[in-house]
Amino acid sequence: MSNTLKDLTAGTAGGIAQVLVGQPFDICKVRMQTAPAGTYQGLLHCAGDIIKNEGPLAFYKGTLSPLLGIGACVSIQFGVLEAAKRHFASQNAAAGFARPTDFTASQLLVSPTSIVSGPVEHIRIRLQTQKGNGADRLYQGPGDAVRKIAKAHGLAGLYKGQVPTLWREASGYAVYFLTYEKLVQRDIRIGQQTREDYSRGLLWRDCGYALWAVIYPIDVVKSRIQTDGFGDKDGRKYSGMLDCVRKVWKAEGAQGFLRGLGPTVIRSPFANGATFLGFELASRALSNL
């Protein structure tokens, strides 16, 4: 099995683990980001409201689309990243010097992953924020959501919120993987260990916190736009990303860009830990193939 195929397979395992672990926190984050100001007093209030009105299974609303889509995205992330790092490392070695390659390599992820993650995130957020059960719901599942949105609004409708998605991923991937690699290299150097023997410990938590510290305000804007109406007839509030930023700032100030941060902080070490653990365990299992 080629190195690229191994990285793609291991990345898929990491993506699936991320969704299964992080989904309950993610739906609370999205609800708190997009609900009218004052709807929820905090994470426990939001979670309690979901359990009371929709039942515990509602925490996994919209899971199927990210289970498939995020698995594919993380597969692409690790596949492209590892291939790019091997390429840059060989070029640097041939030139007789070393320079940081993680930031450059991470930027190659933005276009291929956003093609998948844009509509996947959009569909997930639509399913997470709709309330009611059975026939009361506008969308009966991810397939139904895709069909209805594509029929009414075309491909552009599926890719609603793509601009903030690109901004989020360009900055987020750079911080995420650069932090991961630099901390691994530092700890291996200090501990005199090989990469294969290295234990990640709390490294996953630090990578996740670094990621969200940079991208969270952009993520709020993305969620607002992806739950907004498609046109004036649908009650559209925001004409674009900058318009959303201006209106959120005017109405709520800086606090508006931090709504839902609580579940994100709690989710981060678990979801990111599951991602890297899934990737590392799968990589080791595939190493001898």
Image (cartoon, rainbow, N blue to C red):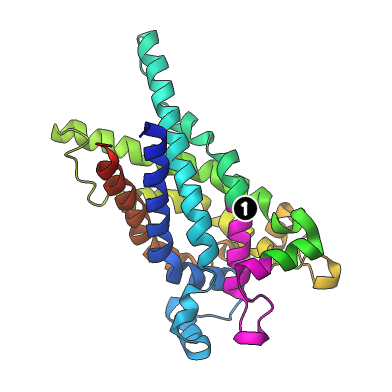
Q: Of all residues shown, which one is farthest toward the bottom? A: 52
Which amino acid lies under the numbered mark 1 shown in the image of this protein? Answer: Gly
Q: Where is residue 210 in the image (x, y as percent from the top left)?
A: 41, 48
Please state if 240 lies on the left or on the right of 280 as rendered. Answer: right
Q: Is residue 16 above or below residue 137?
A: above
What secondary structure prevails in the magenta region? Answer: helix
State the residue at coordinates (76%, 68%).
Answer: 229
Q: Of all residues shown, which one is farthest toward the top? A: 95
Closer to the camera, 198 or 208? 198
State the residue at coordinates (60%, 72%).
Answer: 141
Mark 1 highlights which residue?
118
Mark 1 is surrounded, within 10 Å at the Cα level, by few (under 14), some (14 to 19) or many (20 or more) other residues, namely many
Closer to the camera, 29 or 141? 141
Q: Where is residue 152 in the image (x, y as percent from the top left)?
A: 81, 65
Which quadrant is home to the C terminus?
top left
Q: Is residue 217 in sight in this rendering?
A: yes
Q: Is residue 245 above or below residue 2?
A: below
* Residue 138 belongs to magenta span: yes
Q: Magenta stretch?
A: 117-145
Quadrant in the picture for residue 130: bottom right
State the residue at coordinates (20%, 34%).
Answer: 188
Q: Where is residue 219 in the image (x, y as percent from the top left)?
A: 57, 57
State the residue at coordinates (53%, 35%).
Answer: 107
Q: How many marks?
A: 1
Closer to the camera, 142 or 220? 142
* Residue 52 belongs to magenta span: no
Q: Is residue 42 in sight in this rendering?
A: no
Q: Of all residues shown, which one is farthest toward the left? A: 192
Q: Is residue 107 above or below residue 255?
A: above
- Provide the secondary structure element on which disc 1 rests: helix
